[in-house]
Amino acid sequence: MRELGGLRQEDLSEMTGLTQSFLSMLESGARRLTNIDKIVRLLDGLDAPVELTGPMLRSARGAAAPPR
């Protein structure tokens, strides 16, 4: 996992593909992270372990889809 100490919004933007302005609104509480695609982009950019994402995000991140 990457070291996250001292990251600027611009750094996180580069890592995740989310805009700096969107990240700023998240940080200030002006926006909520509710869009599943943006959640997955954030987790992928932070190299979050798949084991921590739960079954719904595992299929979105390329693992086998859970049975329906």
Image: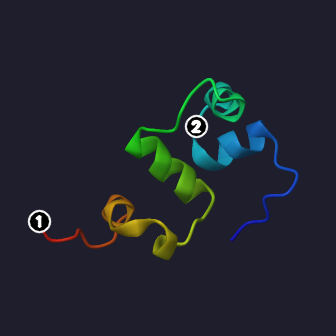
The label on residue 68 is 1
Quarter of the image for residue 30 reads top right
Q: How many marks?
A: 2
Q: Where is residue 46 in the image (x, y as percent from the top left)?
A: 63, 58
Foreground disc of the pair 2, 1: 1
| Residue at 53 percent of width and 58 percent of height | 44
Report crowding for label 1: few under 14, some 14 to 19, many 20 or more residues within 10 A (C-alpha).
few
Q: In this view, does 8 lie to the left or right of 15?
A: right
Q: Where is residue 42 in the image (x, y as percent from the top left)?
A: 56, 49
Quarter of the image for residue 31 reads top right
Residue annotated with mark 2: 18
Q: Do the residues labelled 2 and 1 touch (CB within 8 Å)?
A: no
Q: In this view, does 6 lie to the left or right of 21?
A: right
Quarter of the image for residue 28 reads top right
Say what secondary structure mark 2 lies in: loop
| Residue at 33 percent of width and 68 percent of height | 55
**Residue type of the residue flagged with mark 2:** Leu
